[in-house]
Amino acid sequence: MAKYSPNQRNKVLNKTQEVLYQKEFKQADRIYQQLSQRGRGQ
């Protein structure tokens, strides 16, 4: 396994978390749109 300096490792982790967060946000946004289109009667 490659050895990173702590700073470099944090940058890589931050980038990964950013991508994952964006994916989750898009998915949550889509679900929210579907729910709000149905209206609140349930």
Image (tube, rainbow, N blue to C red):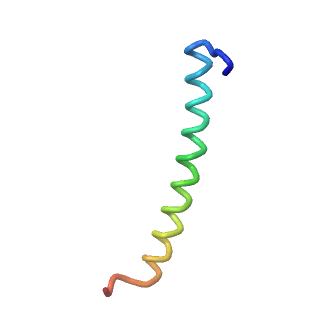
- Residue 5 percent across, percent down from the top left: 60, 12
- Tell me: residue 10, above or below residue 34: above
Q: Nearer the viewer, residue 29 or 16?
A: 16
In the rendered image, which quarter contains the C terminus?
Answer: bottom left
In the rendered image, which quarter contains the N terminus?
Answer: top right
In this view, the residue farthest toward the top is: 5
User: Which residue shows up at 34% across the image and 82% down it?
Assistant: 40
User: Which residue shows up at 57% across the image and 30% down it?
Assistant: 13
- Tell me: residue 40, above or below residue 29: below
Within the image, what quadrant is residue 26 found in? bottom right
In this view, the residue farthest toward the bottom is: 41
- Tell me: residue 16, above or below residue 10: below
Left or right of 25? Residue 11 is: right
- Residue 21 percent across, percent down from the top left: 53, 47
Q: Nearer the viewer, residue 2 or 40?
A: 2
- Tell me: residue 23, above or below residue 15: below
Left or right of 2? Residue 40 is: left
User: Which residue shows up at 62% across the image and 18% down it?
Assistant: 8
User: Which residue shows up at 43% across the image and 76% down it?
Assistant: 36
Query: What is the total number of numbered labels drawn onto the structure image?
Result: 0
Left or right of 7? Residue 1 is: right
